[in-house]
């Protein structure tokens, strides 16, 4: 099995429109990490890393290791929202994968 690509992420406190805009001003993309019977967590990921992975063409079918401030979690992207005019990513959702998860 191929190595999973590691992405750096930061936990964020503010949610909603104001919190998301503040994250975008820092050069990051707001997102949500959910699944695996745990509470959803709001995160921010690096803009450049996400856009590079989006241009590969298989972003939503790739398993990543998300490093949220030292805690590593296997994830798969579930949804990416793009700006309707400029076509830039503005939000990304990740689904946690448990140790024995089967992705179909």
Image: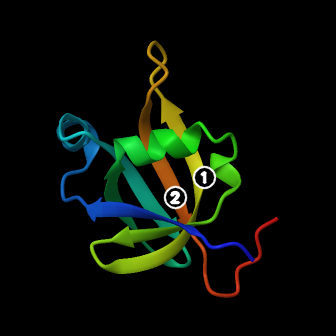
Position of 54 with respect to 70 (left or right) is: right
Q: Residue at x 41, y 56 (%)?
A: 32
Q: Quadrant of residue 7?
A: bottom left
Q: Are marks 2 and 1 in contact (CB under 8 Å)?
A: yes
Q: Secondary structure at mark 1?
A: strand
Residue assigned mark 1: 78
Within-10-Å neighbours for mark 2: few <14, some 14–19, many 20+: many
Colouring used for the render: rainbow
Q: Residue at x 63, y 48 (%)?
A: 59
Task: Kindly give the residue lying farthest to the right in the view shown.
Answer: 104
The picture quadrant where one finds residue 42 is bottom left
Where is residue 31? Give x, y as percent.
39, 51
Query: Which of the marked residues, 2 or 1, is nearer the chain's N terminus?
Result: 1
Image coordinates for residue 36, horizontal then vertical, percent: 56, 77
Which circle marks residue 68 in the picture?
A: none
Q: Who is closer to the viewer here, 57 or 89?
A: 57
The quadrant of the picture occupied by the C terminus is bottom right
The disc at residue 94 is 2
Q: Quadrant of the N terminus?
A: bottom right
Say whether residue 48 is left or right of residue 28.
Answer: right
* Residue 25: image location, x then y, percent: 18, 35
Relative to 31, is 10 above or below?
Answer: below
């Amino acid at each position: 099995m191929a190595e999973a690509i590691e992405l750096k992420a930061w936990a964020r406190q503010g949610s909603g429109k104001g919190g998301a805009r503040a994250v975008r001003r820092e050069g990051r993309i707001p997102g949500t990490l959910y699944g695996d019977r745990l509470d959803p967590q709001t995160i921010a990921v690096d803009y450049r890393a996400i856009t590079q992975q989006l241009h590969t063409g298989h972003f939503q079918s790739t398993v990543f290791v998300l490093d949220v401030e030292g805690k590593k979690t296997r994830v798969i992207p579930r949804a990416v929202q793009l700006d309707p005019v400029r076509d830039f990513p503005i939000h990304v959702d990740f689904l946690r994968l448990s140790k024995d998860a089967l992705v179909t």
